[in-house]
Image (cartoon, rainbow, N blue to C red):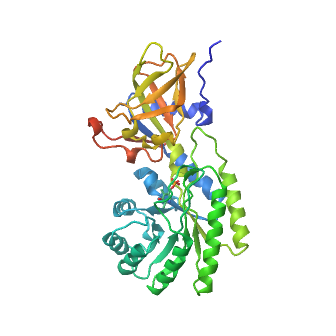
Amino acid sequence: MEKEYHFDLENYISRERFDRIKKFAGDKETPFLIIDLKKVEQKYDELHATLPFAKIYYAVKANPNEDVLRMLIGKGSCFDIASPYELDHVLTLGADPAKISYGNTIKKAKDIAYAYSKGIRLFSTDSEGDLRKIAENAPGSRVFFRILTDGSGADWPLSRKFGAHPDTIFNLILLAAELKLEPFGISFHVGSQQRDIGQWDNAISTCRYLFDAAKEEGIRLKMINLGGGFPAHYIYPTQETSVYGAEIIRFLTEDFGDDLPEVYLEPGRFMAGDSGILVTEVVLVSKKSEANQYAWVYLDVGKFGGLIETLDESIKYPIYSEKTGPLQEVILAGPTCDSMDILYENEKYEFPASLANGDRLYIFTTGAYTQTYSSVFFNGFPPLKAYVFKE
Ligand SMILES: *Cc1c(COP(=O)(O)O)cnc(C)c1O
């Protein structure tokens, strides 16, 4: 017997809530993103409950939607920003400069000066050149130092580009003190969508080593920034947030005992990812030859419309069709005239064989790193629109 198409909707959203969101979506022109604001709030609460002593610096780049940011400001969240534009954006919405961290290690001197003029006193760094710029343009500020991690275990690694070797960091700590900055703490990012919790263990141990080395030079570091990396709910399963929390607490106490430093978190994907439902329409179903086993399904959204994280099929979004019946494995692609605009070819997605032109599909977990990644006018397609569901 042929296998029937099955998608476990309740794994991602209750049927009742999905129906309400579908009603909200109505017949708006696809593609568009719906941001379920309650979901972001729920994720914030979940993380806060799991690591109550930690300060949450939401990584704004994941989803800078105004309603999302306003809600988080209201909840007392702090923010990690990477540019003067993101800074202006969160300040305009009412964020407190004392709750903002300039977390990008790559910055122009004038951007540092601008942030300082707006009251920002917390900067990350990983190089001498950047540290000297901070000393000159943001005198007396707190700095934290980013160590290199290799990103293994992560679906979207951020390795190589950011962070420096612990020995280099040690020298930067000493130089920061010399330059009359306040060496405040150590940060790292274990890679985005990190499914191996043990990666935090290694990095926290390196922090302990640097805390000790600095102390011998009379410098007391006070903070560890555990970065992002906390997962959203894509196709591959991850541990519960509570397991991440319990493990991280275990690693921290193993290394620091009762004398815990201040702990900062910088969740992006975790906070925003699950809130997104991208509504798309099938533009075309076709076969390259009669004998070909797989049909090509072209959607009205693709790599340039917000799904760039399908690069190398790194992030595997759950995609739902409301049709039923026998299933078929397909190759999924976007609508643009660039041959890299293929979403999934190695990973075979299954849909009902009856899927046809004009059918809607719902791409879950698209709340992070989608809308802002969408291109402006490639093939004339406009950037991805977003609507916020506030019920
Ligand atoms: C992007 C980024 C984050 C967020 O990472 P996620 O894996 O999305 O949680 C946190 N910190 C810094 C410095 C970043 O650049």
Q: Residue at x 37, y 67 (%)?
A: 107
Residue 38 visible in the snapshot = no
Residue 215's quadrant in the figure? Answer: bottom right
Residue sitting nearer the eye, 295 or 222: 295
**How many marks can you see?**
0
Q: Is residue 179 left or right of residue 190?
A: left
Residue sitting nearer the eye, 148 or 386: 148
Q: Residue at x 45, y 42 (%)?
A: 311
**Image x and y of residue 33, in percent:** 42, 39
**Image x and y of residue 370, in percent:** 43, 44
Above or below 19: residue 90: below
Above or below 122: residue 271: above
**Image x and y of residue 87, in percent:** 38, 63
Q: Residue at x 40, y 80 (%)?
A: 135
Residue sitting nearer the eye, 220 or 338: 338
**Image x and y of residue 330, in percent:** 50, 24
Residue 123 visible in the snapshot = yes
Q: Is residue 50 left or right of residue 75?
A: right
Above or below 249: residue 299: above
Above or below 139: residue 346: above
Residue 103's quadrant in the figure? Answer: bottom left
**Which part of the image, by quadrant, shows the N terminus?**
top right
Q: Residue at x 63, y 58 (%)?
A: 199
